[in-house]
């Protein structure tokens, strides 16, 4: 069993929604879960809180720390930090514990994303975890000028191309959404980068089995690889 935490679920509320969440929490049955518990209002306070959470995760010996994605958010509702620069900052206190991101795959260009991951890996002391998910909020796709029905095919192209680039391949690709001509990235990752896929429906499990990776290297590095 692996134990970790995701700071995706630690978004703060705003003053306008604080009482709403308090009433929701009060009405929930014991053991229920809510995605956005109470938190800081100001971005600077939220940033300090995230640093404290990252430090606590390392001190507790957790097996991983992830931070997640959101786009086109309403600033009156909550502050939502972009995961890649957030992870870059959190790495200063997480040491060699695995750390990573949960990305809404349809909104990323695979070449730019692979370059950013390779750069993160240059500074990382431990493995990086890149988790791809589809996203399901229509307003996000509308903000990007995308059709939501394209999200599965976009995810599959992004995952396939990003993995090839991170592996050091020279990639030429003419697909439905992305075109690459002899593309390579620099720097290549100097620590292991594991690609995970998330989801909540049976099709997500099939995609994870086909496109994702079992973290064999993570187990070995953490000293608990058993037959």
Image (spheres, rainbow, N blue to C red):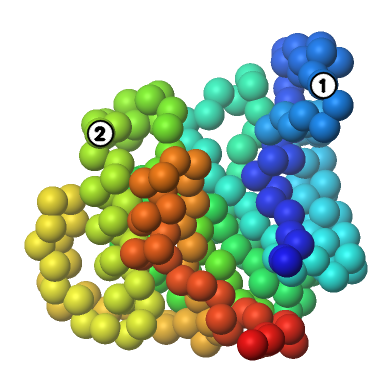
Instruction: Name the foreground residue: 190 vs 160.
Output: 160
Depicted 176 relative to depicted 24: above or below? below
Instruction: Name the foreground residue: 165 vs 198.
Output: 198
Q: Residue furthest left?
A: 174
Q: In the picture, which quadrant includes the C terminus? A: bottom right
The image quarter containing residue 28 is top right
Identity of the residue drawn at 72% across and 29% down:
34
Q: Residues within 10 Å of mark 2 (few under 14, many from 20)?
A: few
Instruction: Name the foreground residue: 69 vs 81.
Output: 69
Q: Which mark is residue 172?
A: none
The image quarter containing residue 16 is top right
Q: Which residue is mark 1?
A: 29
Q: In the picture, which quadrant includes the N terminus? A: bottom right
Identity of the residue drawn at 48% across and 46% down:
199
Indicate the position of residue 55 as horizontal and vertical percent values: 85, 63
Q: Which mark is residue 149?
A: 2
């Amino acid at each position: 069993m692996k134990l970790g935490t995701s700071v995706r679920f630690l978004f703060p509320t705003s003053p306008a929604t604080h009482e709403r969440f308090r009433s929701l929490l009060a009405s929930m049955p014991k053991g229920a879960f809510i995605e956005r518990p109470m938190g800081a209002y100001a971005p600077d306070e939220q940033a300090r809180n995230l640093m404290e959470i990252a430090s606590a995760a390392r001190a507790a010996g957790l097996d991983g720390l992830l931070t997640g994605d959101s786009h086109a958010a309403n600033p009156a509702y909550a502050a939502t930090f972009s995961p890649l620069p957030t992870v870059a900052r959190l790495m200063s206190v997480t040491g060699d514990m695995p750390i990573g991101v949960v990305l809404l795959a349809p909104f990323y260009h695979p070449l730019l994303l692979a370059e950013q991951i390779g750069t993160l890996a240059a500074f990382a002391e431990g493995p990086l975890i890149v988790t791809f998910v589809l996203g399901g909020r229509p307003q996000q796709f509308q903000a990007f000028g995308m059709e939501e029905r394209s999200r599965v095919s976009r995810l599959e192209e992004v995952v396939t191309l990003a993995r090839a680039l991170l592996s050091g391949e020279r990639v030429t690709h003419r697909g439905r959404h992305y075109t690459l001509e002899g593309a390579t990235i620099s720097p290549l990752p100097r620590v292991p980068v594991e690609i995970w896929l998330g989801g909540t429906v049976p099709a997500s499990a099939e995609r994870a089995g086909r496109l994702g990776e079992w973290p064999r290297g993570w187990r070995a590095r953490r000293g608990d690889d058993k037959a």
